[in-house]
Image (cartoon, rainbow, N blue to C red):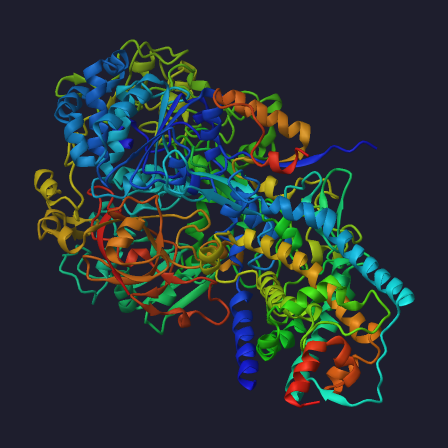
Amino acid sequence: MANTWGYGAMTNSMNDIQNSKAIIIFGANPAVNHPVGFQHLLKAKERNNAQLIVIDPRFTKTAAKADYYAQIRPGTDIPFMYGMLNIIFKNGWEDKEFIDARVYGMEDIRAEAAKWTPEVVADVTGVSVEKLIQITTVYAKNRPGTLIWAMGLTQHTIGTSNTRMAPILQLALGNMGKAGGGTNILRGHDNVQGATDMGCLSDSLPGYYGLAEGSWKYFAKSWGVDFEYLEKQFKDKSWMSKNGFTLARWWAGVEGVKNDEAIDNAGTHLKALVVLGNGITSIAQQAKVKEALDHLDLIVLADPFVNEAAVLTDKKDNVFLLPAATQFETSGLVVATNRSAQWRYKVVEPLYESKPDQEIMFELAKRLGFYDLYVKGMMMEETKDGKLQMIPGKTTFIWPEDACNEIARIVKTIGLTGWTAERVKKHTDNWHMFDELTLEGTGPMKGEYYGLPWPCWTKTHSGSPNLYDTSKPVSMGGMGFRNNFGLEKDGVNLLAEKSVTVIGSKIQGGHAEITKDNIEKVLGITLSEEEKAMMGANWKVDNSNLIVQKCMEAGIAPYGNAKARAIVWNFPDKIPMHREPLHSPRPDLATKYPAYADKANHFRVMTKYISVQSAKDYSKEFPVNLVTGRLVNLNGAGVENRASKYLTALTPEMFISFNPDLGASLGVKNGDMVWVHSPEGTKIKVKAKYSHSVAPNMAFMPFHFAGHFQGEDRTANFPAGTKPYANGESANTVTNYGYDIITQIPETKGGLCRIEKA
Amino acid sequence: MDYARMKFYCDEHRCIECDGCSVACAEAHELPVGISRRKVVTINEGIEGKEFSTSIACMHCTDAPCEQVCPVDCFYIREDGIVLHDKDKCIGCGYCLYACPFGAPQFPRDGAFGAKGAMDKCTMCAGGPLETNSKHERELYGQNRIAEGKVPVCAAMCSTKALLVGDAESIANIYRTRVSARGHGTVGVPYGWDKAYTK
Amino acid sequence: MKKIVYFFIATLALASVAYAAESQIWGEMRIPNILGYGQEQSLKLGEFFTLWQGHYITTIFLGILILIPTVFGIHYLIIGPKTFSHEGKKILAFSLYSRIVHQIAAISFIVIVPTGFIMVFGSFFGGGEFVRICKDLHGVFTIPFAIVVIPMFLMWVKDMFIHLDDIKWLIIVGGYLSKVKNPVPAGRFNAGQKTWYWLATLGGIVMIATGATMFFMDFDIAMVKNITGLSQIDTLRAAAILHNLVGFAVVILFFVHIYMAVFAIKGAVQSIITGYMEEEEVKILHSSWYRKLKKQGKV
């Protein structure tokens, strides 16, 4: 996504979906995972007679509300979308004007799409020719259409390609940058967007700054810390810019874990694990996770509930449970799926001995001796000349307001400058003054959008409800695509064409992102010496925010106005290509559409692709296609929900659901216990639950259960009184090997398994 | 004083079986597990074009059949149409369940040999005959939100606003607006109303 | 006997464990139950039950409660009781075993019938604790009756088949409309007793079955459905309707039985207590049996 047009976030909002005439959903189940937000889709159906199209291996609750539904084979979204494009191009339904002016590389897509005739697509995806044509026609004829996805699209070895393919489909139809259009990726948890924005990843600093030296230096300066000090914390300087392990594969870095995959971790192993509120059963290959936990020297689990890692491990010593406070016992800024901020007020003081996360981290910093540096940034401000200083007279910080203001001060890439604690609180307090449909404020909140969806360029900016919308002035959230990949590629212009001018912009057509070097030329202004002195090298690292200021005056977005790119030349697949899952039920297609070459040092660990896929024909031994997903009453690893008796009562037991036809052929009755075996050699014992919503060659499991491991009840490991009402096998004990080539997200949505009566 | 007639309506075009209503109900009234004053049911699960869900509880019927069959006359109907009952009078015979078209009355098994205890059902969050908002009322009947001027907790919690509660006229208006906005389907009688409110 | 008691207690204990769990009626069964209500293709038992229970059943019971004693009162006043000599010989009519069995059933009925009435007129008694206790007693006293109903059926069945005498007996209403003590055609049991016997045993079993259905609510649904073709809720409705309808008949004949034993024939009740009947009583009221006994030389 970010590699297509600049930002990897939901482009519009849940509310804006009400403006859509067509809604197509790939691999998302908002009726279950976003029940409150789903009302906007239902209202779109009521308001606009919007056509709801659901593409999913399972007939989900969302599909039950759909006008059209296609039961797709897991992992074949790219062929499906190419099939749609094939029909679109053949009929000339693409938005030619939009493509010419705002998209780079669509010709390559057109060439690839030509190969995916509906017949080929039907063979690969299992969706009939008629259905594909019907869905494509409905989606192309009803514009604007919005495209929604979630983990069903991302959790594949080709997840990154999937998430590029969907934007390309939207670009071809000209559905981008307008109300009712866009790519609306649904975030799965409270404040995931905020967590992502803050860089809770091993390959980036906060605000998507990456790990390059320039970024480190910018942060060192903004935090008031010597760059050399930061550098010294690493084994040597080269490790500063290297990716760390990921949540998906950290276990490979632990000494003693049986693994033939080489790691590249500065010649050492992981010794300790600190978990702040993450359910590790949501990650594939639980058996490996358990092995790693057993071999660690130290495990620290900070969670309001007992983290299931403590139950899973056999480790007896040096496992610490820290009682963390819940969201009701702390306050701060949270970010919704549509990039908008909300203030969350504390409801009660932390109960008993529990502490909010930040206090746990402060205490750790104190004991490690860097507390003062850790909190220093909260007491700093920019001076007029673009320098930074300690706020005069300020000796202590106020949590969380000062932390928010620090973030607003530093994170320029996604335009958080306008997100001061004061403004965000004002929005939350005046929630009722905003329009449900446009998010626009009324009365005292006029001229601002609810929650100031980022980019919110300045302290007076309105926020940007729909990304890449050129029909609005920049001051009201307008912008073109981001210029992030150079000005031209192989002689082809990467900037937007002349016809794409953001309303109110001083510049006709596309322009480059603004730096200190080009600002005078691009904006046609002259800077004073004083201004030159205070200005940072480019808009992203300009502490003075002067570049942004000047851009606002000129009515342009600081990040430029460029073309979205269908070709990502720095990726293994320059345009999205179909590749079969590593464990494919169609070995014939795996030969035709093979996986990637194995990738060494992928987030520090060798990651296998083709060598796993070509090792054998798994489908004979493991004939059932397995997908995992969520239930409406449980969330994540489910540990907090399973502690509620009423939520537990809805699904008191872990289960695997499959079609009665499959049950009949397996000789398994509804309610029988079954063993589910995976190609990894692991197995779990769960209850069979008949469901017509699953295709006869498939099975579905929720991933919210924990406490049992390969048939063994480990709940005796819960400290007295903390055992949840429901416990069971984790589905991720049997989800298959397989990780995305770019992000390393596990391939949990489409593996294989074998079901046997227990 | 002229009271508006209170009704429930669950829009099956909107209900997504999130169980928000039933869990909210159980939490708010601290019901024993196994008592579902409100329950979400899905019909034709997994069958394309036919699956739909709806939330069911006591509909507070006009001429409530439960009230007609009760041998101890423990039911009473408020002027706003809310059908309540007196648990101290109820003998747990089960007749109201047989008469009810919606399977609303619930019987906790609290006696010896699994004898049925006093019936429990949706009160539309209006408590019971005991002193309003007293501890005793809360223990027996749950919250009395109506007395506090609040919407019943199920409708307040409904994630898609499928479940509506209010005076008959307002509900019927919302129903008509939604049906005509959809542009298809006929403006008939809301689901369940034929059984509950036509008499 | 012991075996039966143990069996019954075990069944009950098992049942109570099984039914303490959540009833299906609020689970998966709720959907078909709701959908079936009032549908054309259904039996409309829900509406039927509501109509009958809501409008007629209590009235009918009230009618029975008033009418039957009134009729008996009039009979008692106009025709009066039959009195037989207590001076004559006595004939052994009921063995100890049959007396015990009868007494257990009698005690059960003496509790079950009034508590049943109290439930029917629950609103008159104001509901609550008193009626609830009566409901529990109604159930508890079904247990002894359930134990003896089969032995009772078996011990008298051979004397209970219809006989030519019974038709004659019915034509003259057992001679009860006359003060004259003419021999009445009847074997060991007269047509009235036979009717009561069949109703008390077979009808009693129906009452037990329907009552238990309502009490336990979750009888093995698949089995019941296979036999009756009714859904769970309709099974319950049918049970309630049957329980009341059969109840009418049982109650009427129970009253008759009491009236006959206690009022209409002076001292008749003694026979089931001591086992002996007055010879004159047998001679008049069970003339065929008397002849038979005479033939056998037992008198």
Give x and y (percent) for residue A682. 23, 62
- Between B7 and A112, which is closer to the camera in this rendering? B7
Residue lying furthest front: C295
- Between C49 and C73, which is closer to the camera in this rendering? C73
Q: How many marks?
A: 0
- Between B112 and C200, which is closer to the camera in this rendering? C200
- Between B170 and C252, which is closer to the camera in this rendering? C252
Give x and y (percent) for residue A251. 25, 59
* Residue A380 in sight in this render: no
Residue A589, image quadrant: top left
Q: Is residue B88 above or below residue C200?
A: above
Residue A592, image quadrant: top left
At x 11%, y 42%, the residue is A590
* Residue A472 in sight in this render: yes
Q: Is residue A444 above or below residue A337?
A: above
Give x and y (percent) for residue A667. 26, 58
Q: Quadrant of the N terminus of chain B?
A: top right
Q: Is residue B31 above or below residue C205?
A: above
Q: Quadrant of the C terminus of chain B?
A: top right
Give x and y (percent) for residue A14. 45, 31
Query: For this view, does C17 lie left or right of residue A119?
Result: right
